[in-house]
Image (cartoon, coloured by chain):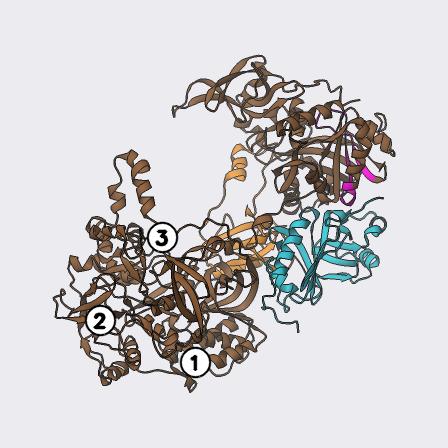
Amino acid sequence: MSDVVSALNGKSMPGDVTITEAGLRGMITLRGDLGNSRVRSVCTGLTGVDFPLQGQANCVGEQGLAWMSPDEVLVLVRHDAVDAALAKIANSLKNQHHLAVNVSDARAVIMVEGAFARDVIARLAPADLHPQSFATGTIRRTRLGQIAAAFWMRDETTFEVICFRSVAQYAFDMLANAAAAGPVGHFPAAQ
Amino acid sequence: MSTRLAKSGRFINKSKQVSFTFNGKSLQGFEGDTLASALLANDQLLVGRSFKYHRPRGVIASGAEEPNGLVNLGKGAQFEPNARVTTTELFDGLTAESQNHWPSLEFDVGAINTHLSRFLPAGFYYKMFMYPRAFWKHVYEPIIRKSAGLGKAPVARDEDTYEYFHVHADVLVFGGGIAGLAAALAAAKSGARVILMEQTAHWGGRALVDQPTIDGMAAEDWITQTVKTLEAMDNVTLRTRCMGAGVYDHGYALGYERLRDHTPDSDGPRHRLWRVRAEQIVTATGAIERPISFCSNDLPGVLLASAVRDYVANFGVSLGDRTIIVTNNDDAYRTAITLVEEGLTVPAIIDTRAKADGELPQMARAMGIRVELGKGIAKAKGTKRVTGVVLCAQAGEGAPLEEIACDCVAMSGGWSPVVHLWSHCGGKLNWDEDQAMFRPDNERPPTGADGAGFVTCAGIANGHLYTAEGVADGFAAGRAAAKAAGHSQKPGQPPHGEDVQEGPITPVWMMPQGAGYELRSKAWLDYQNDVKVTDVQLAAREGFESVEHAKRYTTLGMATDQGKISNINGLAILADTLGAEIPDVGTTTFRPPYTPISLASIAGHARNELFQPIRKTPISDWHSANGAHYEPVGQWRRPYAYLRGDESVHDAVNREVINARENLGLLDASTLGKLVVSGPDAGRFLDMMYTNMMSTLPVGKCRYGLMCTENGFLMDDGVVARIDDQTWLCHTTTGGAERIHGWMEDWLQCEWWDWKVYVANVTEQYAQVAVVGPNARKVLEKLGGMDVSKEALPFMQWADGRIGAFDCRAYRISFSGELSYEIAVPASQGAAFWNALLDAGAEFGAMPYGTEALHIMRAEKGFIMIGDETDGTVIPQDLNLQWALSKKKDDYLGKRAHLRSHMASPDRWKLVGLKTLDGSVLEDGAYAIADGTNANGQGNTQGRVTSTYYSPTLKRGIAMGLVHNGPSRMGEVISFTRIGAAPVQARIVDPVFVDKDGEKQNV
Amino acid sequence: MLILHCPYCGVDVDETDLHAGGEAHLHRESTGSSDQDFENYLFMRENPKGVHFERWQHAFGCGKWFLAARCTTTLEVFGTYSAQTTEPPQDIQDAITHKRQGWSWRNFG
């Protein structure tokens, strides 16, 4: 395999809040019965994290599970581990109605890191980002400017944003623009 | 004259001088001044000319309600028209120019209109410029347009930045006066998340000027202490220079923050639009003083009484040495007392009431101020500024009793609560007879998603004009709002305010009460739109009895100030003329924004490259670097053609078509939608989605499919590939991926939710390249890998494999009529794959082609294009696609609709090919002309062009179109319209122009 | 701008995250239906002043369709519920009755 590149090839805009395209991540959209124990165990087995509750994303390093809808979970693994993961899912869920597809290259991942990261996202998304409502581990699928996106907090000052690959540049530019505008001073520090 | 007093104003810093210019004149003010106070300190009373009569106008107010003081502010990229001088904070280097005058502010030719005012009453334009009809466009409108309008439109591009900020709050408080502060304090102490917004740069509102006592201390100290308390709380956000612009459904509200209008050279966004979702909103927006309608009440030097007091207390500016007070209430006596305390002269307080013995009038009398009871002003004297008033009996018709010289008149007709934000989303009002004001009807608030009220008015805005009840009301409102939002900790004791006792107001809508026409016709209601008492009366006489009609007929309240000081006076005149009660006449609708906000703040970040998302494929960078001339397809930008050197777009397109037909063309087809449909019921489901049978498609094969709406109209098409027993991959049009994905989900979730099918949109997972032309197989074989021979991969089949270094899926499909493969690789390898094809294909004449070449090649082959041959009213039968309508299936989306009489009619226009007799290219969308005319006298038609191109292959124009009974009229010649030219003749032909038998693609 | 509760995500969602899908609880007519029934299915819609049932999709979120019972005059939302039903659930109907005595909509209420 030659010249494997992510949408923005790791582009970064350093600042008080730094915007960085995270490079290629392995992502599998798994649709199925999320209450089913085999579905849950293959997911947790692949990623080493707990199966997420509604509205939650559990991520450690490049691996994780994100709740996307009542019958959809996003499985995050290393980019080069996707084929093996898909094989494992197929094997585990044989004869069980599900759909697992590789969407790694259909997405871009952008990290928003810095003290006022909440302000940066709040400039673009209509979600409630107050620390009482949106804390580490919460995921929200919503609008970022004019595009669909999902984001969750990795820690108190880091958002991980995913969007479609085709609009990665727009998303990055919006986030960089919002970061350059400085802090708003609205959100309190998390308790 | 107006001048700066020796004593400093509260807001200004006399140690810091600020330079600015007005109409090119260099002037000095102080840090903390508004443009209004700085102009007044320089005796620049005259600030503009009125809209219609070009009368000289001065500042009348000290805040957001100002109707007269509008200027063109700044230069170049920072130019802004209609900036209000009273809300523009002064900064060093500010430049302002007055508006609506020619040739100069001091001498204005248009002022002749004021002498014609008898001939320019309400509705004048409507009545006058009716006839002759042709004159409107060519004579009247151009002249009126020239003389109308206030500020200039900006010419230079706005170089500042703007942004949104989305927040959620339990309690949003608008207004940082004492009631708003008390509300915020109570809500915050109750445990709610609170945002408090104040439109000015200062906390405290009018309490700073009048300094009542709160909790035993001067208001200023209480304000400072309360702000400090709030600032220390984690759950409170405080914003000054942030106006409540609007309140909308379900607790949505807009705050308009002006971050650096006062420091334009600093960095950062200029305006921030706060888009707030609040559980509860408290509007503590105070009240606005009303003018009094007397003759020449628009002369410069006639101001609201509270404004005169504000300029003294806040800015150390005196409006004049001799100020006449005219009032119908006690509050205006405060202005008299303040002025006399400053050593200025108040020749008289003219009070319309028979009795004035509250504490304030008593104090004024004790200071030796002359108080005239039961009196009014017959007219103000002066031309460019007031020089005196004529005293009369309020009850009479204006017979002069005495002329009193003055250089300022401070008027007060009472106060109107600012109920705008309450009313924006449906809050209702009651008329308070005693206080002569509309105030919120707290029984009928705006209601939210749960059906309960979500807005509370507090303090003066709620009709509580006095400090004690105002702060208590604010505190109670804040506490109640927090509770309604689910926070009910005990907030402690409400603040305790103290008041002087004031006597009752007596409403005065006309001064004097029996003023004749001469006086009334110069008594202004709406200063900005030049609406006078007589205009409203005329409207009522002419039958515009509804307040909304009278408003539009007279333009009362339709200017940029939206009638903040004029609406109540105007509707009171209307009520009086109609012999109706004020509450029965009612108010006009309050609409957001409260005061104008910048259009740029509404656009936010969405400008320049962020104006809208532009979707890029993994190969886009290559396109841009290699001469791509783009066209938008949805939010995608696809190369229309790749220009080489200085060739024209047309030449490039022709080159690309010829090369793909003769050698090797490469198309970036990544934008085509790709949906995976999988599950035990997937075949059954696709049989419903598509008009053709998809469940029987063998694994490894492809089939072209059509999708219809329930109306039977064609909505999308594409090639479907059977991946495995339970899985299909459906290609959609470029613009259709999201739409068709949503369409499938809709049916799965809402109609057949028991069917076991999952759909996933994998469009962007793949870069897809169409490898097209006689050399297509050669380049793939050169790269090596999977067998792409005719035998291993026949037409309309697909296979997974490897080409060169790339894992891929190859589809043997053709939209060009050539030997063609569409090859999908992971998007992360798309650019590399594209380059590999170009490198390997060089020896075979590889050349990329764009969407126009794609379109021409498909048209040459008679293939339809969704959006060209279809427009939402075209059914498959119209396009001779009956073969794709399965007869074996009981049902599919659109099947029932095709049985409707109009759909089954033999008279529908049907697809044919069209060739002009002279070889020219038909115009896109041209109509085929039929004999006769229709009921509207328009020429009859018998068809239209749907696709038309110059075919480089055939070296002539080719077209497709829908023609009445077309397929049975082969060979017939019909005429097509041309814009601005004679019709052109074209022959009806088979729509397949090239390689009818498919010999080129099936090799 | 409305806020509706997405019953799938459990969050309150701005209208700008949603896609409106018209009237809820339509009965699909297909082959075999009379012209009149098919026309009703395609074109005839309620246009009530008051209680109404609508389809909404959480388009920018989970992508799921849900149904909402709403008052078209006051914009009060009586409840949102799963789209996998042919009629409003009893608790939604009760909630409406509690707020709007004597309501009716098509053959409900």
Q: Which label belongs to residue B220?
A: 1
**Element under disc 1:** helix
Parent chain of label 3: B
Left of B602 or right of it: where is B337?
A: left
Q: Is B343 located above or below residue B874 in the figure? A: below
Asked which quadrant contains residue B400, the reply is bottom left
- Name the residue nearer the viewer: B979 or B418: B979
Parent chain of label 2: B
Parent chain of label 1: B
Tell me which segment is drawn in magenta.
B807-831
| Residue where numbered disc 3 is placed | B150
Single out the mark in the foreground, 3 or 2. 2
- Badge 3 or badge 2: first in the primary sequence: 3
The chain letter corresponding to cyan is: A
Q: Is C100 located above or below residue B994 in the figure? A: below
> Label 1 to label 2, Cα distance in Å?
32 Å
> Label 3 to label 1, Cα distance in Å?
38 Å
The location of residue C87, given as percent across then percent down, is 58, 50
The chain letter corresponding to orange is: C
Q: Can residue B699 be seen in this view?
A: no
Q: What residue type is labelled 2?
A: Cys
Q: Residue at x 56, y 44 (%)?
A: C26
Q: Which residue is drawn at 69% across and 66% down?
A: A157
| Residue where numbered disc 2 is placed | B406
Question: Do the residues marked 1 and 2 share a common chain?
Answer: yes
The chain letter corresponding to brown is: B
- Name the residue nearer the viewer: B166 or B454: B166
Q: Is B34 located above or below residue B773 in the figure? A: below
Q: Which amino acid does label 1 sit on?
A: Glu
> Label 3 to label 2, Cα distance in Å?
30 Å
